[in-house]
Structures are given as C-alpha cells and as structure tokens.
Image (cartoon, rainbow, N blue to C red):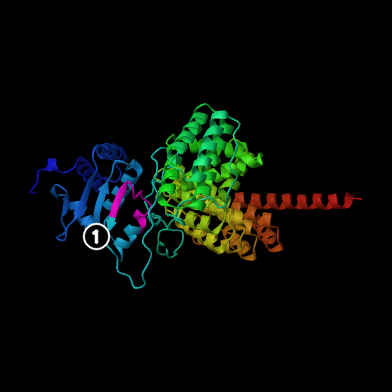
C-alpha cells in the first residue's frame, strides 16, 4: 500500500470493516448496528469515494486503498465507483453492506446487484455501475428518491430481492421449487409528483396566513423576483400553524402551496420555478411529524369534503412519503372507520404500491408486516406481486404475514403461492399456509394438502391440514379423510387415535352418504377411542338431522 491508512477517508475504512463483519459474522446484529452508525457519523464529517481501477484495485482521491474484499465485490458486481455522502442513512448503508458481503452468484450477478441496489437512496449513496451489454437497448435502471432516516417519515429500508425460502428439514412433498423471479421495481421511481388536476387556492381566515397566500399568488402571477421571498414567508406561516396546533390553517396553507405550484408550473415549467417550490415543500417536512399529522387529519376530516380533498392533494404531491405516512397511520388508526378512510385514500395515491414495496423490503419486520396487512386489504394484482416477494423473506414472521394476506385473494396464482409455503422449514409458517388454504375452500387445495397427510412431522400442522381438507368437502377430500380415518396411508402416526378421530369429525361435518358410511363402519374398530368416537359422532349427526326435520315440520 503506497499511501498511509490515515490518508483514506474514515468513512471508507469504517464501511470496509462493516462489509467484512457482515461477511464473516452475518448474525452479529449488535456489532453491525454499532459499526454502521460509526460509518454514518464519519460520513457526516467527510464523504468518501472509492473507484475501481482497470487492474482491479481500489483507489481514493488520496491514492490506493487496500480493501481486498471490496475490490473483489466491486469487480464481481460491476461497480466502478461508490461515494458515501453525509446524507447516507443507517438502513441504506446496512443494506448495501449486506449486498456486498454476499458472494456474486448466478448467470448475471452484476444485473442482479443493479436491480437490488436500485432501491437505495442514490443521492446519498452514489453508485456508478459498469454499462451492461444487452441485445435490445433498455432504459436505465431507476433510482430511488431521497429517504429520511426518521421513523415518523417512513424509511425506504431495502435489501433488494430476498433469498428463497430454504427447504424444510422434512419436506412434506416432493415439489420442485421455481426459480426466484427478478426483483420487483418501483412503478414510478423518478417521476416528479404533480397534482393530477388543479385545486382551488384556499382563502385562509387567519390574517397572517391569508396575507402570505395572497403575496405568493401575486408573485407567481406576475413572475416577479419576489417569488422566493413570498414562498419563504408562506412556509414560515405554515410551520407556525403546525407548531401552534392550528390544523385548519396548516391544511389551508399547504394546500395553497401545492395549488399555486401546479398553477405556476402549468404557466412556466422552468427548472428554477420547480426547484423553488420543491425546496419549499421539503422544508416543511424537515419536521418528521408534519406528514404524519396530515395523514391523521386525512381520516379525522374525512366527512369534510373540501378538507379531505385538499389533504389528498397534499399527500399525493409528497409521493412515496405521503403514501408512507398514510400507510403507517392506517395501522395505528383508532377505529374501523378511520382505517377505511385511510385505505380509500391509499387507493387514490399513485405511489402507494411503491411505498409498500419499500416497506416490504425493510430490515424491520414490523414494517414488512404492516405492508403485508395493507396489501392484503388492497387485493389488486400489484399487491399480490409484492406479497409473493415477501414470501421469500428470511424472517418467518414476515412470511406468515404475507400468507395471511394472500388468503384473502381469489386468483389461482395466489393459491399456488400459498401452496409453496407448505414446504417452509418453519412449522408456524406451514400452519398459516394450511389455514389460508382451508379458508379458501378451493377444490384445488385438496391436492396441495394431500402430501401433508402422509409426511407432515408437526402435529399441529398435520391436524390443521386434516381440517382444511375437510373444509373443501369434495369427493377427493372424502376419500383422503376415509383413508386417514381407517389408519391407512404413509404417515408414521397413521394409527394415532387422535389423528383418526379428527378425520372422522371432518367426515361427519361433510355429511355425504359416503362420508357417514365410512364413519359408521369404524364402530367395530380395534381401537377403543376410535369406536367410541364413531358411535358418538354418528349419534350426534342423527340428533341434529332429527332436530332440523322437526323444526321444518313445526313451521306453519
């Protein structure tokens, strides 16, 4: 190494240590979090850039940098330059470290890395990737907009595509696992948010706010040099309204800014004007609770048509951040009516699915579960795609949430996706998949559940599968249950009285002649528990039938 270590920016040395730590000790979560915070602190003091040379070595502006692991990863993933700025967030840096810690694999590791890294904040972490050769020319990879690191203004924490679910210790079925699909990309990654239609400029009742709105309207209409000062004054008035809890003035002031911005850009869409309004709106969301307060007001004022439309326009203008705020408010909303209002507002926002895709890739399991809950309520094709991606999440709680959400979908593809989780290594995930299939009552679910009746090692999952097969009530389901009730099949516990009695109970619930006859035949079984259950279940079914007949006769 020709240059002393001290000449290399501290942020780069710390980041190289972080990548090495994640590679060698992937489960050392506490140490990783501590070190990534040191990277952030170092970046705030001075940013740093690493460049990959033609000879495969890394260099900084000060000279060569001996980071063997990073040099190898840069070459394998096609990274030509990396710059970590003072705006880099903990979540994005940790995600990038995890990407670089992984050994390049697959037919196109550079392409896979480009897809995964597209969700990072490219303004804070600048990546220059090697141009890729392709037969048909393709559009450049999208980059994600800047993200705040504060929880109240939701963070885009992403690790890109998630690893496939590992095979179970005792696989319930010999089913081929399909190749992992390409990572989903945001639908509107870099498009600036504009109002879909003009809204009226409010006339606030507050004197200072009204004067600021009028001054901005005049400056915009006359295209005068006073426009920046007028914008600054209105931003201060809106900020004051927020700090004083004047919510009506807050809504009117922010609605005035977005309405006048739309009006100004319709007249003159120059970069100067666009940047002025963008800067003004960003200044307001420096306070992390500003957007969250707007999301709260969106459902609190849902009955007020004027206020709700203004709030909808403001949240739309803030793009992913507005959708993030509404998504988190949906989860914490106090009543069903509040959640319904938030959900209706989310359906109208253009960036809702981009927001939920980011939350689904978060390093926080809570964020992922929140995203799955909302996606399950939206129940559209894009939501299903994101939920299927969550099924490959390494955290079992995230997979369970995705399975539960997919249970409310009706498409054949969602049924197939749920069935894949019947092979999950975690019993609680398999249990949730079985419950979701049983709730669907789809005849196709019987064939998917059948292997579990012969091979499922977990008793709770096995018993749930028997009940789910019975819920289908098809002739195929009856034949499967008869085999279980008679103690046949390949399962090691096929002679278990509990297992056989449960199958009898499911058959009686189906109540077809074939099912009832099979249960009656077991009254002479060698197992005393099975004999007793057979007679009891048949008698109960007979009494219910008699009671139902008497009720019909008694009707006038």
User: Residue shown at 9%/49% (left/top)?
Assistant: 1
What's drawn in magenta, residue-wise? 115-127
Q: Nearer the viewer, residue 114 or 206?
A: 206
Total numbered labels placed on residues in the image = 1
Of the pair 235 and 160, the residue shown nearer to us: 235
Residue extending furthest top? 244
Q: Is residue 270 left or right of residue 47?
A: right
Percent from the top left, x then y, of residue 157? 39, 46
Image quadrant in which you'd find residue 89: top left
Q: Which residue is mark 1?
A: 76
Specify whether residue 176 is in view.
yes
* Residue 328 in view in this figure: no
Horizontal and vertical percent position of residue 212: 52, 34
Question: Is residue 310 part of the magenta span, yes or no?
Answer: no
Q: Residues within 10 Å of mark 1 (few under 14, many from 20)?
A: some
Does dot 1 land on a helix, a strand or a loop? helix
Instruction: Identify which residue, 335 or 398, lies in the foreground.
Output: 335
For image coordinates 60% across by 41% down, the residue present is 339
Residue 121 within the magenta-colored segment of the rendering: yes
Residue at the image point whose x is 36% and y is 48% from the top: 121
Image quadrant where residue 302 sits: top right
> In the displayed structure, does residue 302 sit left or right of residue 331?
right
Give coordinates of residue 347: x percent, y percent.
57, 50
Q: Position of residue 66 (x, y in %)?
A: 14, 49
The residue closer to the viewer here, 449 or 304, is 304
Tell me if 387 is positioned left or right of 472 in this view: left
């Amino acid at each position: 190494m020709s240059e002393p270590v001290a000449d290399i920016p501290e942020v780069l040395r710390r980041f190289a240590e972080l990548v090495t730590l994640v590679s060698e000790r992937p489960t050392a979560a506490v140490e990783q979090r501590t070190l990534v915070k040191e990277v952030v602190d170092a970046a705030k003091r001075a940013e740093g850039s690493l460049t990959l040379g033609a000879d495969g070595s890394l260099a900084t502006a000060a000279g060569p940098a001996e980071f063997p692991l990073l040099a190898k990863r840069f070459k394998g993933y096609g990274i030509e330059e990396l710059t970590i700025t003072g705006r880099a967030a903990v979540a994005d840096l940790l995600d990038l470290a995890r990407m670089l810690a992984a050994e390049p694999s697959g037919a196109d590791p550079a392409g896979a890395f480009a897809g995964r890294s597209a969700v990072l904040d490219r303004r804070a972490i600048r990546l220059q990737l090697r141009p890729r050769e392709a037969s048909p020319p393709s559009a450049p990879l999208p980059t994600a907009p800047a993200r705040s690191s504060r929880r109240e203004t939701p963070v885009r924490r992403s690790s890109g595509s998630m690893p496939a679910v590992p095979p179970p210790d005792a696989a319930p079925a010999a089913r081929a696992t399909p190749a992992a699909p390409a990572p989903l990309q945001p639908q509107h990654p870099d498009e600036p948010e504009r109002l879909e239609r003009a809204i009226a400029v409010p006339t606030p009742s507050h004197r200072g706010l009204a004067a600021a709105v009028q001054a901005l309207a005049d400056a915009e209409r006359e295209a005068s040099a006073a426009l920046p000062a007028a914008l600054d004054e209105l931003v201060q008035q809106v900020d004051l309204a927020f700090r004083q809890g004047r919510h009506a003035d807050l809504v009117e002031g922010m609605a005035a800014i977005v309405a006048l911005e739309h009006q100004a850009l319709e007249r003159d869409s120059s970069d100067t004007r666009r940047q002025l309004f963008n800067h003004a709106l960003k200044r307001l969301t420096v306070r992390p609770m500003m957007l969250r307060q707007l999301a709260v007001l969106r459902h609190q004022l849902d009955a007020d048509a004027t206020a709700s439309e203004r709030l909808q326009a403001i949240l739309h203008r803030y793009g992913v951040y507005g959708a993030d705020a509404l998504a988190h408010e949906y989860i914490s909303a106090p009543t069903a009516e509040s959640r319904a209002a938030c959900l209706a507002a989310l359906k109208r926002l253009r960036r809702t699915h981009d927001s939920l895709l980011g939350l689904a890739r978060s390093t926080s399991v809570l964020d992922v579960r929140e995203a799955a809950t909302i996606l399950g309520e939206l129940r559209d094709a894009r939501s299903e795609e994101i939920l299927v991606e969550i099924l490959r999440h390494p955290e079992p709680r995230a997979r369970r949430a995705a399975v539960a959400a997919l249970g409310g979908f009706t498409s054949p593809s969602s049924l197939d996706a749920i069935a894949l989780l019947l092979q999950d290594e975690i019993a609680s995930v398999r249990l949730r998949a079985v419950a979701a299939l049983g709730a669907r009552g789809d005849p196709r679910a019987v064939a998917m559940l059948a292997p579990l009746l012969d091979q499922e090692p977990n008793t709770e999952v096995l018993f749930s599968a028997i009940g789910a097969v019975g819920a289908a009530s098809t002739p195929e389901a009856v034949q499967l249950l008869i085999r279980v009730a008679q103690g046949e099949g390949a399962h090691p516990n096929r002679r278990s009285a509990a297992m056989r009695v449960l199958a009898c109970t499911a058959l009686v619930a189906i109540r077809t002649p074939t099912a009832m006859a099979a249960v009656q035949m077991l009254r002479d079984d060698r197992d005393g528990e099975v004999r007793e259950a057979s007679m009891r279940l048949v008698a109960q079914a007979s009494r219910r039938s008699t009671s139902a007949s008497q009720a019909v006769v008694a009707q006038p």
